Amino acid sequence: MHSMASLQTADTLINAHGVDYLIIGLYFAFVIGIGILAKRAVSDSLDFFLSGRSLPAWVTGLAFISANLGAVEIMGMSANGAQFGISTVHYFWVGAIPAMLFLGVVMMPFYYGSKVRSVPEFMFRRFGTGAHLVNALSFAVAQLLIAGVNLYLLGSIVHALLGWPLWVALLIAAVIVLSYITLGGLSAAIYNEVLQFFVIVASLLPLTLIGLHRVGGYQGLKDKITEFAASAPASAGVPSADQQLQAWPGQALSGFDSPVLSVVGIVFGLGFVLSFGYWTTNFVEVQRAMASNSISAARKTPIIGAFPKMFVPFIVIFPGMIAAVLVSEIAQLKGGGSPPGGASGRGVQYNDSLLFLMRDLLPNGLLGLAIAGLLAAFMAGMAANISAFNTVFSYDLWQRYIRKDRPDHYYLRIGRLATVAATVIAIFTAIIASGFSNIMDYLQTLFGFFNAPLFATFILGMFWKRMTATAGWAGLVLGTLSAMAVFATNEWGPLDLPGQGAAFLSASTAFVVDIAVSIVVTMFTEPKPVAELRGLVYSETPKEDLIDPHEAAKPWYQRTMPLAGVALVLVIILNFLF
Amino acid sequence: MSNAHEPSGRHTAGAFDIRNFIGALLGLYGVILTLMGLFGDKSLDKTGGINANLYAGIVLLVVGAGFMIWARVRPVIVPPHVEEPADGPGPDAH
């Protein structure tokens, strides 16, 4: 690094020039512009909350993955890449793609076909008030907290990169997200997510390619990682080169010593319970598909999203792996050292991998694009949380329990007010997060617990018409509690699983307990009349309600099932390659 | 609930087609990076001897133009109305 840069980077992690600010500024101008233009299309609450159900599948498909491609994903996965290597791909190829395909093929017809406006509303129609309240409340609170965490991460990155005070960065980011969502509702959020997707790719792809060039291609990267693993002191606990360079059995990631247990843990814990819970019942994701223009487009949303999703690891995990051999601070950290500095100022962490790599590899210009890409990712995450929150709050909580039967524009106004309130709360959450980062970690883990039993309840409820309303909420509550119990036993009790093993185990426990409780409770309670289950339960729904009659006439690449098949084959091939 | 927010039968989405936005932003980035690659500090020590700004700029220009062309060739037809909104969003509509 030349001397001028190192002089100016005394305070900030990188050294941004005018041209970088220009690129970042352009991005914000476009984001706001989309919000202003999207406002013209909002005339009723359905426009605001579900984009009038009018978007094409490629738009909702990209938004579907972009909503998830937030701060935690990009920084966290590159951090995992730096620490554990290639087995991080399981979060994508095992932990996302199968569940996304399942959502599109099996579950989406019920969500879209039943014309519910949110996932909790489906819960209400199937199981009534108890399960609905559990689902709607936990979802709403979780979204506020996660939006706050996203906002905090965004603020701290801006602080580290550009040197702005944390509160200034928080406020500016919050105001931008607030303005485009209050103006344009979900359309603005979704259109921005699509734009964000391309900006993120445009910023991370050059970084990855330059990085690979610097280490001498993929072979060079493998050689360097092998060399590093061989020379690192045993006390550093660096995973062996084999473990870092082969996806399976992924012991470093799962934390299980036995390869068999590790594979079982990854496939069942991560691939089945955790990921199906997240991708198929999380309204942040499902809302994107509900905004599409037909049942066919809704089903294709997660399937189209699966194609870019399977290649995201290459521009997220690879930079992390490259950083671990190329960036001196990250290499030191991995070798057991504790270099000072980093984005937090409290010492370098794996989460800083991407930032350091940007600093070391990118010329000004591309650097601005990379920062814009990161900011885009953070805002995408936060905006997705807030646009899902305002829908659930307005339809599922306010309209259902507080003020029924008002005219539609009333709920549109409530939606806008909820957006403002959510943003203000997110700012406060962000400030709390900046003081107590550990508490936030625990809370996020806690909300993760709600997802695993949700999937069990949904899937039972969709395919077993006998399942009763009491079983719905009892399964959810006991499933969630059992997950918490396992997690607590691991954290403070006799159980001691390192890595992600505890999360896998608690999710699996929640799933099994939920199913068991639901079955037992159903045996002793009265089921809903069959007439009320049309569109909600497989056996009571006519086939033609679940598919798009026009789809059969389209070419194969526009049909749900062939697309899902291709995606599945591709992801299996990828698993064999790495 | 009226379906009147799209007045005429077939009409194209015009300026507010997200593809135009993506094309415009990526194109602008392409211009800036290409200029940086030609006239700016190339930082060859960082990139390992590649003029990264120039290459990235050219690729962005091509991709941006691609989105603009796609939007011109296959404009979005806004349907008269898309779906019937859920029959009166009455909370008790079972």
Image (tube, coloured by chain):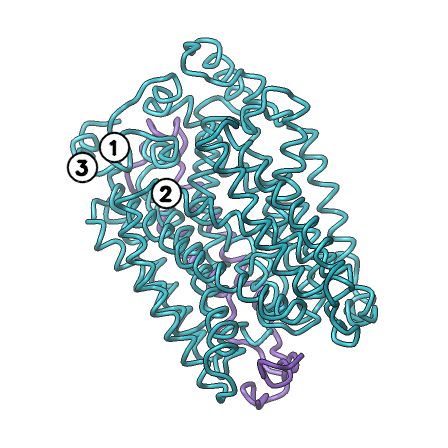
Chain colours: A cyan, B purple
Residue A62 place in picture, x, y as percent: 56, 56
| A127 up-or-down from A310: above or below | below
Task: Write down the quadrant of residue A218 in the picture.
Answer: top right
Residue topped by disc 2:
A366
Q: Which mark is residue A346?
A: 1
Q: Chain of mark 2?
A: A
**Three-letter code for the amino acid on which mark 1 is drawn:** Arg
Q: Is residue A18 left or right of residue A325?
A: left
**Judging from the image, what secondary structure is the residue with disc 2 in?**
helix
Label drawn at residue A283: none
- Tell me if mark 1 has few (under 14), some (14-19) or many (20+) residues whose alpha carbon lies within 10 angstroms of its own: few
Picture coordinates of residue A18, whole percent (x, y): 23, 49
Q: Quadrant of the C terminus of chain A?
A: top right
- Mark 2–mark 3 Cα distance, whole angstroms, equals 21 Å
Which label lies toward us, 2 or 1? 1
The residue marked by circle 1 belongs to what chain? A
- Quick one: A235 or A468, which is closer to the camera? A468
Name which residue lies at 21% across and 33% down.
A5
Find residue A82 and report its image quarter.
top left
Foreground mark, 1 or 3? 1
Q: Counting residues from the N terminus, which is met first, the one under dot 2 or under dot 3?
A: 3
